[in-house]
Image (cartoon, helix red, strand yellow):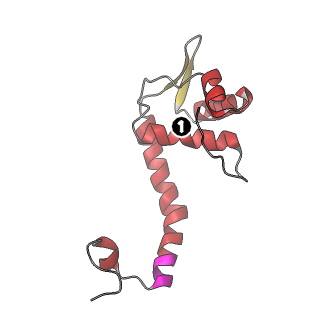
Amino acid sequence: MNTHQWQDGIPIYRQLKELVIARIIGGELKPGDALPSVRTVAAEYQLNPITVSRAFQELADEALVEKRRGLGMFVIEGAPQKLLASERRRFLDEEWPQVLARIEQLGLDLNQLIDPAKQWGKP
């Protein structure tokens, strides 16, 4: 049984959607691959099937997966590239400014960040 820990304050269907997105970006789910069934996911994560359906429907609404009548949901062609571009934009718009502010706050040097072999705080 899967022991995934859900985060408080974020709807579980969104967290499940993000898990599927991570699997697509990571190459675990490739274009043409079927998503596990709603029942399988609901049982594995001990979720209400409606929660799983909602996550899958959002993926379909975003044209990342398609429903094939009687067969299930499948990752569409181009989904990994579309997701990667979207995640890169989100990182640059939302996460990077916070990372950059923290780098500046700590007074870190670009060379220290690029070369992990350098000892922190040593010449």
- Residue 48 against residue 85 in the figure, above or below: above
Q: Position of residue 97 (x, y in %)?
A: 51, 70
Q: Position of residue 120 (x, y in %)?
A: 35, 81
Residue bearing the label numbered 1: 20
The type of residue carrying mark 1 is: Val
Q: Is residue 99 above or below residue 90?
A: below
Task: State the residue at coordinates (49%, 22%).
Answer: 34
Relative to 81, 68 lies left or right: right
Residue 117: image quadrant is bottom left
Residue 122 is situated, as x and y percent measured from the top left of the image, at 30, 87
Query: In the image, is residue 121 above or below residue 79?
Result: below
Q: Which residues are magenta?
A: 101-106
Residue occupying the point 44% across, 86% down: 107
**Label 1 neighbour load within 10 Å: few <14, some 14-19, many 20+:** some
Q: Nearer the viewer, residue 17 or 123?
A: 123
Which quadrant is the C terminus positioned in? bottom left
Direction from residue 1 to residue 81 in the image, left or right? left
Q: Position of residue 110 (x, y in %)?
A: 34, 78
Q: Describe residue 54's horizontal placement relative to residue 34 as left or right.
A: right
Front position in the image: 89 or 122 = 122
Give the residue at the far bottom of this rendering.
Answer: 123
Question: If the image is split into quadrants, where does the N terminus sit?
Answer: top right
Disc 1, SS: helix
Residue at the location (60% across, 42% down)? 4
